Image: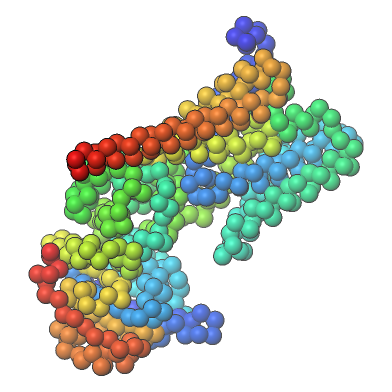
Amino acid sequence: MISALLNFEFLQNAFLSGLIIGVIAPLLGLFIVVRRLALIADALSHVALAGIAGSLYLSQSVLFFSALNPIYLGMATAVGGSLLIERLRGAYKNFEELAIPIILSAGIGFGAIFISLAKGFGSDLVGYLFGSVSAVSRQDLWVIVTIAIVVIAFIRFFYKELFALSFDKEYAKVSGINGKIIQTVFMIIVALVIGASMRIVGILLVSSLMTIPVAAAIQLAKSFKGAMLLSITIGELSVIVGLFSAYHLDIAPGGTIVITSIIILLGVLGWNKFKGKKRVGKVKGDLMHDVG
Amino acid sequence: MKKILIDCENVGFHYGHSTVLENISLQVRAGEFWALIGPNGSGKSTLIKIILGLLKPDEGTVKLFGHSAESFKQRERIGFVSQKSNSFNSGFPATVLEVVKSGLTRKVGLFKGFSKQDEQRAVDALKIVKMDSFSTSNIGELSGGQQQRVFIARALVGDPDLLIMDEPTVGIDQKNVASFYSMLNDLNREHGIAILLVTHEIDLVTELASHVACLNRSIHFHGVQSDYRKMDDEHISSWYGHPVRRVHASKGDMDK
């Protein structure tokens, strides 16, 4: 793949996009997971599906949409969905999690309507659902680079506020941190990252790149910064192994990237169990020795 | 005359048609240690939320350091410790030092990261609560009592003038409760921090506090500890809602 990578622009686009997404998806994912909002990424990716399906459907009859990259409408609907989730969470203060299935269902509902109206989209839609190595254009790459700059700047400048809000929302509020504005901007950025990631990982699997590397990292890390670095490392490893296997096996990269991250997660869980058993064994041994 | 830090004047609060608080007037001054006691459902936590600006009173006014509680901006002057069980997810991947540093978030200001000096302040706050040897431990691995000490360090790191605590000993085993209160005593006496402590443990705390306020929807008594101790148990039982019998512990017991 290395020589092909040097010769083909589409492969360079896919590889560079993948590397960038491997950083930003788990980076934001950590803040989502520790706030127990892992399903938000799923809801927003399904809203993005509605936007992409809508754009593909309209491109059949409206000239403007035939020239528009469907990713833009996908991102716009995901951002709209993120703001709606925030509004709904406010409306259902005691059942905040209700906002997620409502928006998720709305996304699938609209997506299904547009797909039916267009009588299917064939390979185009499959690429958006499961990702594609060949579909990432140079324009897509620049969109992803721009979003990555926004994400990294946001985390850099609001890291301590995001940590305080994630660790203890009530304390953050009492100490005068404006959680409402930060949370709204955070949700918009999550929607943009989902939009940026779906070309490579696909709409149906984008949330897994935000959550599975984090799920593995929090099993190992003691500190928040450690969990952040480990999540990114596992995300990058999954993307690199996933993209190489997808290219060689000629299959959708979304599947290979996610399955690689699942294998890493299983390895981490197995390692922790083994370590736990070893520790219990050592304690038992020490006790036996003490008794003896 | 010492400076007034909290000034509640005729505060009232209702949830729908039921009155939770009525005519609450209370002043906490610099250096005082107040115990706010009352049975479950007496409105203690609601009053704390009003004082902290999390709830708006339906009647009356609350001033913090001479400013209206709602518009009060110098939040770092107040340290807050809530019930352990309410405040965080014990699986959260964070070290003790990271948690304590988060208490400086507002003081450091927007767009800036923590400096080496901030880190040193966090270590110093951990020293006060005797938890500095745990700075790199994961917060979830500590016992309930140790976690509460860390949360006090987080409240202290911004160098507050006032510490407000809402039943901080809930979920902590009895052995550690006495040493926890002893630490509060040191913070008040040696560091001069005013404390408003909400609790329903009327024995231990009222021995420590310089002032006591008894709340059950309205204030039934507020004043210095010696006057509170003079009241008979029957009188306390009459507003508390069920029979109360106080056991007076000596301060020596507290320090053990």
Name the quadrant containing residue A207: top right
Name the quadrant containing residue B224: bottom left
Identity of the residue furthest to the left in this view: B252
The residue sitting at 18% across, 69% down in the picture is: B31
Question: In this image, A32 relative to A195: left or right?
Answer: left
Q: Is residue B155 above or below residue A274?
A: below
Residue A212, position in %: x, y?
55, 36
> Is there any visible trace of residue A63 in the rendered image?
yes
Residue A50, position in %: x, y?
76, 43
The residue nearer to you, when weighing B81 against B22, is: B81
Q: Is residue A233 above or below residue B31?
A: above
Residue A182, position in %: x, y?
50, 50
Q: Is residue A258 above or below residue B49?
A: above
The residue sitting at 76% across, 38% down in the picture is: A52
The residue sitting at 37% across, 44% down in the picture is: B94
The residue nearer to you, when weighing B114 against B17, is: B17
Q: Quadrant of the C terminus of chain A?
A: top left
Identity of the residue furthest to the front in this view: A292
The residue sitting at 34% across, 44% down in the picture is: B138
Question: In this image, A291 relative to B220: left or right?
Answer: left
What colouring does the structure picture have?
A: rainbow
Question: In this image, B30 relative to A248: left or right?
Answer: left
Name the quadrant containing residue B190: bottom left
> Is there any visible trace of residue A174 in the rendered image?
no
Please tell me how many numbered marks the rendered image carries: 0
Q: Is residue A181 above or below residue A27?
A: below
Residue A261, position in %: x, y?
56, 30
Q: Quadrant of the N terminus of chain A?
A: top right
